[in-house]
Image (tube, rainbow, N blue to C red):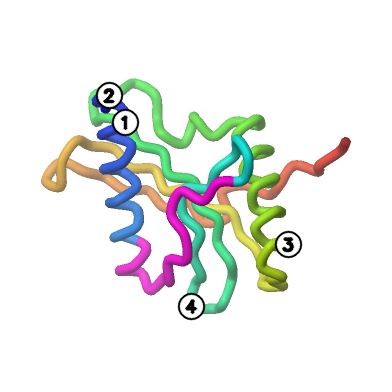
Amino acid sequence: MASHNDLGKWGEDKAEEYLRRKGYEILERDWRYGHNDIDIIAVADDKTLVFVEVKTRALDDLSTPEDAVDRKKIRNIQRAASAYVKLHGLDNRLRFDVVAVRGKNDKEMEINHIVEAFTPIPYIR
């Protein structure tokens, strides 16, 4: 496995731990719909269904993890979230968050949880 894959997996693990500590119930990790995926699907304490995109970067990386969530990524998350909601027949309030993890180990790590990081882009066929 490439080192960037290891860093991404580590970041998702840290994001999941962080969300659990904050009281979120984790429903899914790495949920796939076709070529689209959602890193974490969780339920907040107010029963909001939260679709979480996790982005991880090393501390010395010049770009921020949040910058990697572009229009294309948002559209892909939206497609997968829509499929998840329909598949499970859910009617919860929905929210899209980003958890940005910077670091390389547990001692040198920063987590930035951006609640309602984006609203879905209108899906036009």
Cα separation, mark 3 vs mark 2, equals: 35 Å
Q: Which amino acid does label 1 sit on?
A: Asn
Q: Name the residue under label 3.
A: 86
Q: Which of marks 3 and 2 is nearer the N terminus?
A: 2
Q: Which of marks 3 and 4 is in front?
A: 3
Q: Earlier in the sequence, mark 4 or mark 2?
A: 2
Name the spot of residue 38 as percent of width and height, x first.
Answer: 53, 48
Q: Which residue is drawn at 81% across and 43% down?
A: 122
Q: For residue 23: magenta?
A: yes
Q: What element carries label 1?
A: helix
Residue contact at pointers 2 and 1, CB within 8 angstroms: yes
Q: Mark 4 points at which residue?
A: 45
Outermost residue to the left: 107
Residue 69 in the figure: left or right of residue 60: right
Q: Name the residue under label 1.
A: 5
Q: What residue type is labelled 3?
A: Lys
Considering the image in quadrants, where does the C terminus appear? top right
Residue 50 in the figure: left or right of residue 17: right
Q: Which of 58 and 9 is in front in this view?
A: 9
Q: Is mark 2 on a helix, strand or loop?
A: loop
Cα separation, mark 3 vs mark 4, equals: 22 Å
Q: In this view, does 85 lie above or below 15?
A: below
Q: Mark 2 points at which residue?
A: 2
Considering the image in quadrants, where does the N terminus appear? top left
Q: What element carries label 4?
A: loop
Q: Earlier in the sequence, mark 3 or mark 1?
A: 1
Cα separation, mark 3 vs mark 1, equals: 30 Å
Cα separation, mark 4 vs mark 2, equals: 36 Å
Name the spot of residue 66 as percent of width and height, x first.
Answer: 46, 36
Residue 76 in the figure: left or right of residue 10: right
Q: Is residue 110 above or below residue 5?
A: below
Q: Give the range drawn in magenta.
A: 19-32
